């Protein structure tokens, strides 16, 4: 009977050792998974930091473009005013051109058909 108790004790010891090894392996596997998860979280956090830097850079760039756009709006306004003035000048030039054409026609007509003759007592002044 003592021998069967020793066999039983040895079997129980083997069972506890096996269960302990199994639990230890399970815990080690869980620990490895947690280590992997921590590394993945660190990697994702690093990428989000990089994306945050990119987003901040884009925000600064957008603000710079907006301020430059405001300056361009001023130039566009000035260009519109210049274009308006040019259109007004073109209209004035067109009117003057027609006036000059009319004057040229009158002068040509006068040279072709003089209405006034120079009088003999008209003299040319010379100094």
Image (cartoon, helix red, strand yellow):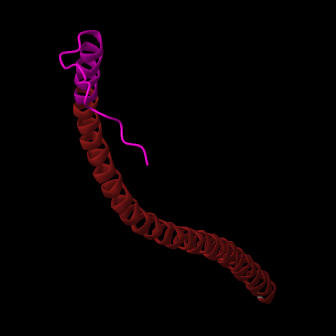
Q: Nearer the viewer, residue 119 or 48?
A: 119
Residue at the image point whose x is 40% and y is 59% from the top:
72
Q: Residue furthest top?
A: 112
Compared to residue 124, the image places residue 31 above or below, namely below
- The count of marks equals 0
Q: Nearer the viewer, residue 116 or 61?
A: 116
Compared to residue 70, the image places residue 125 above or below, namely above
Question: Where is residue 58 shown, x and y percent of the image?
Answer: 50, 66
Compared to residue 52, the image places residue 102 above or below, namely above
Question: Where is residue 109 shown, x and y percent of the image?
Answer: 24, 13
Residues shaded magenta:
99-127
Quarter of image, res 119: top left
* Left or right: 73, with 23 as reference point: left
Q: Nearer the viewer, residue 96 or 109?
A: 109
Question: Where is residue 86 shown, x and y percent of the image?
Answer: 32, 43
Question: Where is residue 107 shown, x and y percent of the image?
Answer: 27, 21
Quarter of image, res 20: bottom right
Residue at the image point whose x is 77% and y is 79% from the top:
14
Q: Nearer the viewer, residue 36 or 14?
A: 36
* Left or right: 77, with 19 as reference point: left
Residue 33 within the magenta-colored segment of the rendering: no
Residue 112 within the magenta-colored segment of the rendering: yes
For the N terminus, the image quarter is: bottom right
Residue at the image point whose x is 18% and y is 16% from the top:
115
* Left or right: 58, with 98 as reference point: right
């Amino acid at each position: 009977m003592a021998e069967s108790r020793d066999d039983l004790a040895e079997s129980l010891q083997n069972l506890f050792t096996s269960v302990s090894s199994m639990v230890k392996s399970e815990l080690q596997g869980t620990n490895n998974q947690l280590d992997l998860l921590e590394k993945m979280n660190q990697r994702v956090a690093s990428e989000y930091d990089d994306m945050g830097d990119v987003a901040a850079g884009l925000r600064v760039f957008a603000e710079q473009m907006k301020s430059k756009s405001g300056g361009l709006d001023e130039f566009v306004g000035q260009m519109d005013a210049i274009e308006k003035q040019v259109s007004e000048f073109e209209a004035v030039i067109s009117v003057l051109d027609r006036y000059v054409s009319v004057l040229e026609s009158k002068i040509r007509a006068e040279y072709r058909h003089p209405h006034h003759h120079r009088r003999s007592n008209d003299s040319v002044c010379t100094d």
